[in-house]
């Protein structure tokens, strides 16, 4: 029996596992490059490639939902408790990443108005959870896998058609912050959604459409066999990907920029297929249009076809599979690498010791940092896969981790408060106690408690024995002097 004629029903979709696993790995590279590589060294092709990671990840989430929500007989699996708890935990992790901190001090004396607002920034995990909740609700409303598959495709097409209009200046401004970021990524009250549902829900919706197709052709049995082989499905995936890429790439520029400029009440607007927008708005909506979404989906499907084909043809080996571990433990690896980068390696004390601050490395250093981070996170994923095989041991580790977090919540952060209470000149966030601390030291109060004199900062840094390079002093001086212009 050849791969083309093998109609053995699928128990797990290998190509989507490969896509999710590689998306997690490349995501680590994205954050490492964005943090450490000099901005001028980053080529455009790398920026575009890195821009495919989040669409891949969100599309894979929708794909898995379509397969896991409906049983092979067409009935629905229950939402409670497993699915609800899993989505709830992901949402908790999502908001924890943008919380003021994980200690009582962070939520109280070290909190600021802007930090509190940042809690409601819509990032990729929030986008995934809310998109899946909407798709779950749709599945339970129609209760038919074929109708659900068709409606998921309709959402994937409809959302990018209307999304540019929701990105027009002023739309949704002033709405309740917890839902403000669902509509667009325009800044409002200092908060800017990174993955608003318009247009980002299009990717999990299209993934749900593909998952519905995979379920129909590869999972549901007819006389004990699948309708299509895995190889045939991958070929169909490649055809869809090629079509989406060809149409999206060819239509993208004309869809956005092909129109007529007209002046209305002194304002120039470009009237095109996307609508009527100002020049500044056109830059913001360039990635929200239907051709842009289609082109990215095309690249993802072609890449997924290659991954699925390689996985189909490669010899099997014994032992742990890091790519499979990255796919199955994607949330763990996502949370781990973000905390390693932003909470550990970018901590002021670590930067002082290493000099590895934002944009401080060339290609060699950045690639080395990326390789180390990928190796550490993959090792953690493989290790946790082994731990899962012993559920009692896994639960003990989880309970200990929760206990440690609880202790840290109570005890952590207070020395930071004490540090800025004694040295308010060094603060970079407008904590409410700073002016009182300045007055206690005989310093004049400022509008937000932050110092306005670079020499004041440098004197306190010298007293604290903080060694600053000439470049660091120049950068700090610019930041401090800019505060006066902000008021």
Image: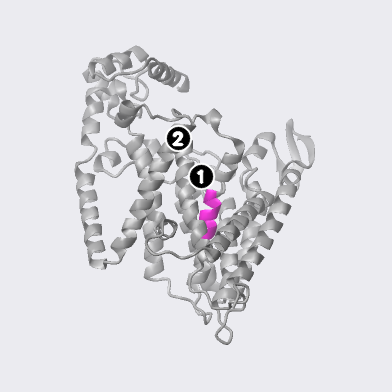
What secondary structure is found at the residue carrying circle 2? helix
113 versus 236 height, above or below:
above
Q: Would you call the spot at circle 1 few (<14 residues within 10 Å), some (14-19), or many (20 or more)?
A: some
Membership of 464 in magenta stretch = no
Q: Position of residue 471 (x, y in %)?
A: 41, 17
What secondary structure is found at the residue carrying circle 1? loop
Query: Which residue is at a point 64% across and 43% down the rendered structure image?
Result: 285
Mark 2 sits on what residue? 366
The stretch in magenta equals 53-60
183 versus 346 height, above or below:
below
348 versus 216 height, above or below:
above
Judge from the rendering whether residue 430 lies leftward or rightward of residue 422; answer left or right. right
Q: Position of residue 221 (x, y in %)?
A: 56, 82
* Circles 2, 1 touching at the beta carbon (< 8 Å): no
Mark closer to the chain start, 2 or 1? 1
C-alpha span from label 2 to label 1: 24 Å
Q: Position of residue 135 (x, y in %)?
A: 53, 65
Q: Which quadrant of the rendered structure holds the N terminus?
A: bottom right
Disc number placed over residue 194 in the picture, else none: 1
Q: Main secondary structure of the magenta part?
A: helix
């Amino acid at each position: 029996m050849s791969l083309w004629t093998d109609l053995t029903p699928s128990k797990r979709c290998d190509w989507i596992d490969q896509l999710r696993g590689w998306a997690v790995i490349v995501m680590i590279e994205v954050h490492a490059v964005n943090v450490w590589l000099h901005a001028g060294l980053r080529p455009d092709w790398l920026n575009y490639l890195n821009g495919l990671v989040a669409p891949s990840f969100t599309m894979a989430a929708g794909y898995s939902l379509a397969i896991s929500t409906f049983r092979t007989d067409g009935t629905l699996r229950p939402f409670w408790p497993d699915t609800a708890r899993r989505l709830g935990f992901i949402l908790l992790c999502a908001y924890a990443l943008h919380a003021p901190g994980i200690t009582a001090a962070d939520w109280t004396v070290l909190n600021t108005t802007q930090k509190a607002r940042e809690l409601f920034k819509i990032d990729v995990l929030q986008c995934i959870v809310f998109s899946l909740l909407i798709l779950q609700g749709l599945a339970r409303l129609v209760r038919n896998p074929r109708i659900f598959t068709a409606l998921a495709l309709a959402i994937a097409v409809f959302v990018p058609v209307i999304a540019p209009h929701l990105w027009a200046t002023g739309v949704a401004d002033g709405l309740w912050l917890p839902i403000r970021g669902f509509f667009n990524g325009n800044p409002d009250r200092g908060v800017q959604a990174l993955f608003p549902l318009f247009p980002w829900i299009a990717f999990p919706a299209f993934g749900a459409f593909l998952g519905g197709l995979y379920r129909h052709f590869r999972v549901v049995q007819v006389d004990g066999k699948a309708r299509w082989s895995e190889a045939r499905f991958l070929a169909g995936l490649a055809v869809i990907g090629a079509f989406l890429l060809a149409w999206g790439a060819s239509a993208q520029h004309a869809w956005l920029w092909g129109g007529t400029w007209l002046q209305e009440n002194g304002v120039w607007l470009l009237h095109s297929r996307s609508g009527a927008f100002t020049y500044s708005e056109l830059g913001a909506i360039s990635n929200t249009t239907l051709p842009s979404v289609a082109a990215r989906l095309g690249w993802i499907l072609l890449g997924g076809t290659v991954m699925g084909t390689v996985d189909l043809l490669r010899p099997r080996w014994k032992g742990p599979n890091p790519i499979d571990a990255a796919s199955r433990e994607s949330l763990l690896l996502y949370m781990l690498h973000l905390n390693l980068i932003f909470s550990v390696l970018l901590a002021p004390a670590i930067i002082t010791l290493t000099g590895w601050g934002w944009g401080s490395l060339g290609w060699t250093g950045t690639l080395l940092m990326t390789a180390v981070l990928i190796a550490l996170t993959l090792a953690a994923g493989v290790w946790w896969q082994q731990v899962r095989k012993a559920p009692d041991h896994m639960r003990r580790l989880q309970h200990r981790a929760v206990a440690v977090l609880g202790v840290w919540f109570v005890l952590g952060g207070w020395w930071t408060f004490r540090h800025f209470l004694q040295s308010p000149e060094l603060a970079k966030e407008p904590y409410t106690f700073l002016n009182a601390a300045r007055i206690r030291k005989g310093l004049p109060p400022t509008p937000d408690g932050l110092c306005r004199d670079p020499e004041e900062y440098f004197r306190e840094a010298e007293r604290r024995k903080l060694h600053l390079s000439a470049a660091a002093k120049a950068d700090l001086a610019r930041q401090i002097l800019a505060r006066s212009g902000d008021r």
